[in-house]
């Protein structure tokens, strides 16, 4: 079946540090891949997406590249800010338009 | 536009009680979803409605029923609540008309405790 696996948190970084959150997936067909972010007390918001292999999604300094050969979609940011503290979810959409989410990775950024 | 609206925001039930979680979207979206969020397990799909009049089971449908009342509304019912259903519930919707717009919109969640 379809599934998403992402690194467990929490991840604690100092401001301006480099961020990587790993995500791998299992899916049949040709899924689209997403990163969503959740701030405390809120629902999830789309951060970035990639719809086919080798596509790079980017938004607000975050980037992720759809790697079909390694079935991965790792999230990166060159310099994190305190305001980036949140929970990040990797997700895929299958050919039947169902979305599957990873378990979430909590990011804490310290000043 | 309000987006995706869920009610109630908080609810406490006793084991065996029933309740319905309401969800409505005003964006003319075709597909709607119900997820539950549990610590360490992320979001798990309970039920899915591709379009008005259709529903499909997700990963964890047991103990739940859904109704796609019309294009706007998608309700989730717990017939006999159990402590294992204590969770945060999220409704979501998306357009899906073969367009490149694949943004899933989420409600703000319902925190449910079953004692």
Image (cartoon, coloured by chain):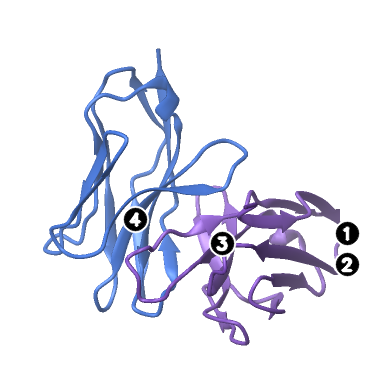
Chain colours: A blue, B purple
Cα separation, mark 2 vs mark 1, equals 6 Å
Q: Tell me whether circle 4 and circle 3 mark residues in contact (CB < 8 Å).
A: no
Say which residue label 4 marks. A34
Disc assigned to residue B14: 1
Check whether the beta carbons of the residues at disc 2 and disc 3 lie within 8 A of each other: no
Residue B110 placed where, x, y %?
71, 53
Spatial separation of the CA atoms under disc 3 and disc 1? 26 Å
**In terms of secondary structure, where does tag 3 sit?**
strand
Determine contact: label 4, label 1, CB under 8 Å: no
Residue that badge 3 annotates = B92
In the rendered image, residues at marks 4 and 3 fall on the same chain: no
How many marks on residues? 4
Percent position (x, y) of residue A100? 42, 65
Give the percent coordinates (x, y) of residue A24. Answer: 26, 57
Residue B36, picture quadrant: bottom right
* Circles 3 and 1: CB atoms closer than 8 Å: no
Of labels 4 and 2, the one closer to you: 4
Q: Nearer the viewer, residue B91 or B79?
A: B91
Element type at mark 4: strand
Q: Residues within 10 Å of mark 4 (few under 14, many from 20)?
A: many
Is residue B22 visible in this depiction of the protein?
Answer: yes
Outermost residue to the top: A111
Residue B115 visible in this rendered orientation of the protein: no
Task: Measure how far apart labels 2 and 3 are at the Cα level.
Answer: 25 Å
Which chain letter goes with mark 1?
Answer: B
Q: Which residue bears the numbered disc 2? A: B17
Quarter of the rendering containing residue A97: bottom left
Instruction: Identify the residue at the far front of this view.
Output: B1
């Amino acid at each position: 079946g379809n599934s998403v696996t992402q690194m467990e948190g929490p991840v604690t970084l100092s401001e301006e540090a480099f961020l990587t959150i790993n995500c791998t997936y299992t899916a049949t067909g040709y899924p689209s891949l997403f990163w969503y972010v959740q701030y405390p007390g809120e629902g999830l918001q789309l951060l970035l997406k990639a719809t086919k292999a080798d596509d790079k999604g980017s938004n607000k300094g975050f980037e992720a590249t759809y790697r079909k050969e390694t079935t991965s979609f790792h999230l990166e940011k060159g310099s994190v800010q305190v305001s980036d503290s949140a929970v990040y979810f990797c997700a895929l959409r299958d050919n039947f338009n169902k979305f599957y989410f990873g378990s979430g990775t909590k990011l804490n950024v310290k000043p | 536009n309000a987006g995706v609206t869920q009610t109630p925001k908080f609810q406490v039930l006793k084991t065996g009680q029933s309740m319905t979680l309401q969800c409505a979207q005003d964006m003319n979206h075709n597909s709607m979803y119900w997820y539950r969020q549990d610590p360490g397990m992320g979001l798990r799909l309970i039920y899915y409605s591709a379009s008005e009049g259709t529903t499909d089971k997700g990963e964890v449908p047991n103990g739940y029923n859904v109704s796609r009342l019309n294009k706007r509304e998608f309700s989730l019912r717990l017939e006999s609540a159990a402590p294992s259903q204590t969770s945060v519930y999220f409704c979501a919707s998306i357009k899906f008309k073969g367009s490149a717009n694949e943004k899933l919109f989420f409600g703000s969640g319902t925190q449910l405790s079953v004692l």
